[in-house]
Amino acid sequence: MNYELMENNKVFLKGVVSSEPKFSHEVFGEGFYELDLKVKRLSDNFDVVRVTVSERLLSNEDFALGKLVAIKGQFRSYNKICEGKSKLLLTVFVREVIDFDDTMNPNIVELSGYVCKEPIFRTTPFGREICDVLVAVNRAYNKSDYLPCIAWGRNARFVKSIKVGEKVDIIGRIQSREYQKKLNENEVLTKTAYEISLNKIRVENMENFIENDGQLA
C-alpha cells in the first residue's frame, strides 16, 4: 500500500454504536457491513456518522449495539444506484479499533486533496457566512474520494477564493445534518447529509493554516 495514500485521509472517531450492522457488499469473499456511530460534539449535541466495517472486526463484538468504541480509518465516497439514479454516499471505512481515553477529541479528520469544484459562498438570513467546497482525495488503485466540506466565517471568506485544482490540507470533523426533501404536495422525506466542518485549511503554496472562528460546537 502506498504510504502517502494512507496518510492523506485519516479519521479518528469515538462514539456509541447506534444501529445494528447491515450488510453492504463483499470484496474477494470478505463481507463488509454498515452501522452508525453516535459521536458527541463539543456541545451537548451529537453527530450520527455512518461507518463501514469488515466482518473480521465485527467478530470481536466491539461493534455491539450501545457499546462505546474508538476507531481509525478513512472517509470515503462511492456511487450507489438508488431508484435508478446514481447517488454519492459517504462513509468512514474502519481500519482498526483502538484504545481510547476521555481526553481524546472524539471526531477528527485530516485530509490532503484537491479542490475539484468551484466553491459556493453564501450568507444565511442571520448573517452567517458559509462556503461549500468539494475536495477530491486520492486513493489506491487510481480511485478518488469526493468529500463535501463546509467552512464558516473567516474560513468561508478564505475558501471562496481557492481555485479549482489547488491542493489543500484540511483538519476538521465529520458532521451530520438532517434536511427535508419535498416529494409532493403531501409528502416530505427527512434525509441525512454528511460533510466535513472545516477547522483549519491550508493551500499547499501558503505557509500557514487559516483557522476557524469558533464554529465547531
Image (tube, helix red, strand yellow):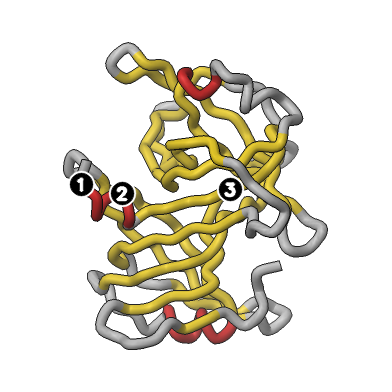
Residue at 33%, 48% (x, y): give it. 145
Quadrant for the C terminus in the image: bottom right
With respect to residue 149, does 74 lie above or below?
above
Residue 103 location, quadrant: bottom right
Check disc 1 and report its element: helix, strand or loop.
loop
Precedes in sequence: disc 2 or disc 3: 2
Quadrant for the N terminus in the image: top left
**3D distance between C-alphas at marks 1 and 3:** 23 Å
The picture places residue 146, in percent across and down from the top left corner, at 36, 52
Q: What residue type is labelled 2?
A: Met
10 Å crowding of disc 1: few (<14), some (14-19), many (20+):
few
Pick whichever, 11 or 23, lies toward us.
11
**3D distance between C-alphas at marks 2 and 3:** 17 Å
Residue 184 visible in rendering: no
Contact flag, marks 1 and 3 (Cβ < 8 Å)? no
The picture places residue 167, in percent across and down from the top left corner, at 27, 71
10 Å crowding of disc 2: few (<14), some (14-19), many (20+):
some
- In this view, the residue farthest toward the top is 29
Q: What residue type is labelled 3?
A: Leu
Check disc 3 and report its element: helix, strand or loop.
strand
Precedes in sequence: disc 1 or disc 3: 1
**3D distance between C-alphas at marks 2 and 1:** 7 Å
Count the marks: 3
Q: Which mark is residue 6?
A: 2
Contact flag, marks 2 and 1 (Cβ < 8 Å)? yes
Q: Where does label 1 land, which residue?
A: 2
Check disc 2 and report its element: helix, strand or loop.
helix
Q: Where does label 3 land, which residue?
A: 13
With respect to residue 35, does 157 lie above or below?
below
Residue at 23%, 70% (x, y): give it. 165
